[in-house]
Image (cartoon, rainbow, N blue to C red):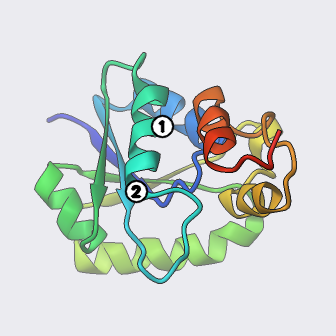
Amino acid sequence: MHRIAIYPGSFDPATNGHADLIERAAKLFDKVIVAVGVNLAKTPLLTVEERVDSLEKIVQPLGNVEVSQFDTLLVDYAKEKGANVILRGLRAVSDFEFEFQLAGMNRRLSPELETVFLTPLEQHAFISSTMIREIVRLGGDVSGFVPPVVHQQLKVKYSNIV
């Protein structure tokens, strides 16, 4: 049996923490699917296409990682892709309660799917896409928090950042 993990998120934008998690997951699983979710309730910094494009460039050196987008129930999308693991990142204790509830709901909806949590490297534990969006909107420097391809993408789209 192949171990296929699906790593869902908005990735708006992808951070160094996301890249770290993807790289480490690629060593643990036969295949990793980075699934960019479409959330119509949020006002994104980057379009879904821009997020998919940057993630494809980030994962290019990893031979067992693919990037896709989805707008369905995660457990249904995981089944469609043949995934047997949902991969989630935990940065801090504050993430745990929400992630625990989510894992329980996903288990109830699809008992054959396991949720696995990875923690980021210490230097990435405080980074969140929400913080990056705020820094970008206020014209701050995010170069130390996002992969170079994402930084370049943000510089082109938002001329006020350095």
Label 2 packing within 10 angstroms: few (<14), some (14-19), many (20+): many
Where is 116 relative to 150, above or below?
below
Q: Amino acid at mark 1?
A: Ser
Where is 8 relative to 40, above or below?
above
Tell whether label 1 touches label 2 (CB within 8 Å).
no
Q: Please state the horizontal and vertical placement of residue 63, each as a whole percent of the image.
A: 32, 18
* Outermost front residue: 159
Residue underneath mark 1: 54
Residue underneath mark 2: 48
Q: Which of the image's four quarters has the C terminus?
A: top right
In the image, 108 versus 6, the foreground residue is: 6
What residue lies at 79% left-to-right and 43% top-to-bottom?
142
Q: Quadrant of residue 48?
A: bottom left
What is the secondary structure assignment of the residue under circle 2? Answer: helix
Where is 95 relative to 136, above or below?
below
What residue lies at 69% left-to-right and 40% top-to-bottom?
155
